[in-house]
Image (cartoon, helix red, strand yellow):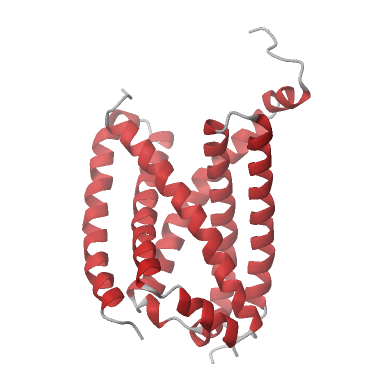
Amino acid sequence: MYRGKEGQWAFILHRITGVAIILYLLVHAGELTAAMFGPKYSNAILHFFHQPLFQLGLLSVIGAVLYHALNGIRIILMDFTSWGTKVQDKLWYGVLTLFALLYIPTVIKILPEIFGGGH
Amino acid sequence: MAIRTRKFNVAKQQASTNLELIWWVFMRLSGLLLAFLVLAHIYANNIRISNTEIDYTYVATRFSKPLIKLLDVLILYLALLHGMNGLRYVIEDYIQHDGWRNFIKYVLYVLVAALMISGTMLVFSFPFHKVGG
């Protein structure tokens, strides 16, 4: 059932995206804390993270969140329904299809903003 | 199965199945809520507008809305706890050395606690908008 099949890829991707998201969240929650100390520090830090490199990172994190959310729903279906585990491989292809349908338009929307010189 | 150890730490781990079960349930519940909350958060701050437009004024305006205060504190707590426990699973799976594993876990717990406190302070350091205003 495991070993190189769909379930294992789903698991590995869930782990990698999960670790990426929590590491991002630690920075994200810390970064915004500067807003407590007024516009000067806050704008400096927000502006720093508007560099293309960080924006590309953010676009990747958005993809990570999307996969993690969709596959998380797959895990819940596997755990709480009688049929979930029987069709877990089909569910995973559903996850990948939904991911592509939602993430491709997101990339098309955001990518030009990164290199088009934001405000 | 024979008793594997007499070490207090390991015995405590073996006795902690109720807590592990509570975390297991929490991961599913918070995960389902977060799937909707975080995707809405991304839609509001990355799709509806460009992320590069975000400045102090945007942050301050957003955090002065009562509903956003409530939702953002909820999303922060759920996401930090969900992420903290997820990272704990990963740490416990891959870091074999007892000392390093415990050290990294405690650093993580302190960091998450600090961000829950500072995040709450942040959200409530902005005045409440007038209702309907």
Above or below, A52 relative to B37: below
Q: Choose between B85 and A19: the one closer to the eye.
A: A19
Above or below, B61 relative to B29: below
> If the image is split into quadrants, where does the N terminus of chain A sit?
top left
Count of numbered circles in the view: 0
Q: Residue at x 47, y 76 (%)?
A: A48
Picture quadrant where residue B18 is located: top right
> At which x and y percent is residue A119?
36, 86
> At which x and y percent is residue A59?
34, 63
Farthest residue to the top: give it: B2
Instruction: Report the side of B108 relative to A95 (left or right).
Output: right
Q: Choose between B98 and B81: the one closer to the eye.
A: B98
Can residue B33 be seen from the camera position used here?
no
Q: Residue at x 21, y 49 (%)?
A: A97
> At which x and y percent is residue A40?
58, 87
Above or below, B33 relative to A29: above
Picture quadrant where residue B68 is located: bottom right
Can residue A91 be seen from the camera position used here?
yes
Q: Residue at x 39, y 43 (%)?
A: A14
Q: Choose between B53 and A6: the one closer to the eye.
A: B53
Above or below, A115 relative to B98: below
Q: Choose between A14 and A24: the one closer to the eye.
A: A24
Instruction: Report the side of A115 relative to A25 (left or right).
Output: left
Q: Residue at x 51, y 54 (%)?
A: A23
Picture quadrant where residue A29 is located: bottom right
Instruction: Report the side of A106 relative to B25 (left or right).
Output: left
